Structure formats: structure tokens, C-alpha cells
Image (tube, rainbow, N blue to C red):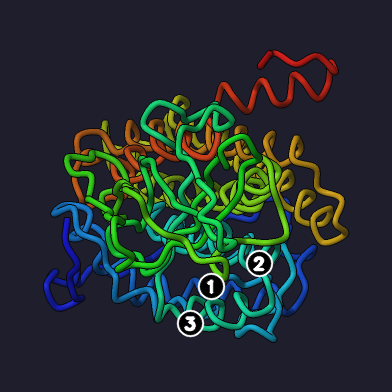
Amino acid sequence: MSTTTSETIERSTKTDQFVAPDYYQLDELLSEEHLLVRSAVRDWVKKEVSPIIEGYAEVGKCPLHLFPQMGALGALGPSLPAKYGCGGMDEISYGIIMQELERGDSGIRSMASVQGSLVMYPIYKYGSEEQRMKYLPSLAKGEMIGCFGLTEPNHGSDPGSMLTNLTEDGDGGYILNGAKMWITNSPVADIAVVWGRVKNGPIKGVIVEKGMEGFSAPVIKGKWSLRASITGELVFENVRIPKENVLPNVQGLKGPLGCLSKARYGISWGAIGAAMDCYDSALRYSKERIQFNKPIAQFQLTQKKLAEMITEITKAQLLSWRLGALANKGKASPAQISMAKRNNVEMAIKIAREARQIHGGMGITGEYPMMRHSMNLESVITYEGTHDIHLLITGMDVTGLNAFK
């Protein structure tokens, strides 16, 4: 993959006709601010994402020009304080933004949620005031791009076994060695929030800057999923991390896991957007496609598919809305977030597959969004906690027994 501009990819002339389903009139639960935020992001997706996303996904390029546009929308770190150039919005607004971005494409939502939840959030939550002022305003504008380094080539679901290590250099800083894998944004990132284990000590977070000697971020090629999002590695060979780049206010796994909870919450909303897009396309197509002298929407099996889709979307909407209400009160637990992430992504991938069937052969073409969403969701169901890991998190929460030990 490589960077590109919007002019490189031919813009589709097809009109984005998306109409969001709201079967239980959930808009009545949203504030005027929520509705305004949603309208702004939805309009932007229709204007700037929908006309180009199939082209970018087909050639496997990342539309990096969208970063500053998302910054102008307030979509990067939207629930962080306005003091640092962020949106200062509530958690439901953050969720709604992720839903609308992923309705456009999971890769676009990944670009934003990594920036906001996995880079900006830990700098805000665990960083010094100097670090916040240095990095957050530029990240919020999309002028600077960040990535998050936790997963390793041999340690994904078990981050506590990470091999990336930090050796004290005697001046309050560290020498960083190791490697991270499957890192969204890494080949184009200006900074990386990286987690490593201090030798004979705890896990700590550090901010690694592009250009530091011994730091490289090779691209991962050959992906069939998230093709409009750039993914790479992080490689550290005796990288010196100065004291001012060490996150001072956290140590241990609670640091990166706190970031993952923030991101997983956003994914629970984002997956609804992908499901909505597939359902909306299937509903419209089924009313237009004539077979045996009537629209296929009139057949019982098609109606069964559509009825099950809207039911599952509605359940997911209620799950994430309630989770957002809890998050606004600081009461959303990591286990509750796990349940929503797992349920909603599984729901979305099933709907993408059923919607593809309703479209028949046309469903495998770029004329419709289902195959792109389905391929993307194969990554979303795995990253930031696999489907099975989230099942075990819920199992541990309800039984009090730890299956990981």
C-alpha cells in the first residue's frame, strides 16, 4: 500500500441512497446534539467516503486525505476535552460518530478509532500535561497521525506475555527493543504509543516518534480485509526513548487494556453502521429485483431474512445505547463493553452475509457494499479481542472463574 490523494481514485457517480433504520424509534432517546453530530458525519460520509471507498478498497490504498477532514468534523478524539482541541462530546456522540464512519467503511472507522481511542486517549489519560499539549491538538486536527503498539507476532490474545522490552538508560528514559504486528496506521504514523515490559519491572507505555534511530514501520501487504486501511509492523532496535516520552501515570496491563475498552466501545457502535448499510441495500434491492413476476421482497424467505436483520440491528442499537448511557456516568465495565463488541460484530457479519445472498450474483460486485463489509468484518471480529476471547471475558464475569489461567 501507499499514500494517495482523492484525485488518484475515480469518484463514483452513484448516489448514496442510505436511509438508516430506526424500528424502535430510538432517535427519541438521542439529544439534539446527538442528532446534529450524526447528521454532520452522515452527510460527510455520503459526500466524501461513499464515492471513493470502493475504488480505494479495490486497489488496496488508504485515503489519507480524509484524516484532516475527520479532524475538522471533530471525529478524532471526540469525547476528549476541548482544552486540547478535541470535541468535548459525550460517549454517545462518540459512538454515533463511529457508527456513521463504519457505515462508510470499517477501515475509515479504524483510522479514526485508533487515532482517538488508542493514541489520543492514553496520552490524555496516562500522559503528562506537557505530553497532552504537545501531541493532542495536532492529532485532533488530523495533522499528525498516530498508531498503537500492543499486539506482537507471537502474542495477540495474551498481551501479558509480550517480549517487547524496555531497559533503563540511567537518565529516566529507556532503550526499546522488540516488534509489534497488525498495527493500523503504522507505516504512515508520526507517533506510536507502544507498550513494553521493563526488565525486571512492570509494563510501561512510551511515545515513539517517527525518525527515532532504530525505529521502522514496514507495511503489511496482501490483505483481503480492511483494504482501505493501511496496516503494518513496528520494529524497535535499540531505540532510545527519552524521559519526556514515557507515559508517567500508569504501569501494568491496566494501561493498554483501558485503551482497548475505549476502542471496543466504539467498535460496538461502528459494527451497527456496517450492518445498517448491508440491510438498507438488501431492503432496497429486494423491492426492485423482479423474479417470477413479483419483487423478491414478496417471497417469504426474503422477508424472513429482512425481518431477522432488522430485529438484530434493533437489539444491537439498544445494547450500545444503554452502554453509552452507562459510559456517560462512568459505569460501563470492561465486561459490559466486551459483550457489546462481541455481539454487535457477530450480528453485523451475519447480516453482511445474508444481505449478499439477497443480492444474488450482484452481491459479489463493487456495485453493492456487502462483500467489502463482510471482508472488513472478518478483521473486526478478530481485532481488539477475538470473538472467543470476549466470550471468555463474559464467562469470567458471570462465573467469577478465570478461564485464562
Q: Is residue 19 visible?
A: no
Q: In the rendered structure, find residue 351 and report the number of the disc placed on it.
A: none
**SS at badge 3:** helix
Q: Can you give x and y, in whole percent of width and height, for residue 161 in the image? A: 54, 27
Dot placed on the residue nearer the N-terminal end, 1 or 2: 1
Q: Is residue 14 visible?
A: yes
Say above or below: 174 vs 348: below
**SS at badge 1:** loop
Residue that numbered label 3 is attached to: 138
Q: Quadrant of the N terminus?
A: bottom left
Within-10-Å neighbours for mark 2: few <14, some 14–19, many 20+: many
Residue that numbered label 1 is attached to: 75
Foreground mark, 1 or 3?
3
Dot placed on the residue nearer the N-terminal end, 1 or 3: 1
Residue that numbered label 2 is attached to: 127
Q: Which of the pair 106/362 is nearer the observer?
A: 106
Q: How far apart are the two marked residues, 1 and 2, measured between alpha carbons?
A: 21 Å
**SS at badge 2:** loop
- Circle 3: residue type: Ser
x 56%, y 21%: residue = 388
Q: Which of the pair 373/186 is nearer the observer?
A: 186
Q: Quadrant of the C terminus?
A: top right
Say above or below: 147 vs 223: below
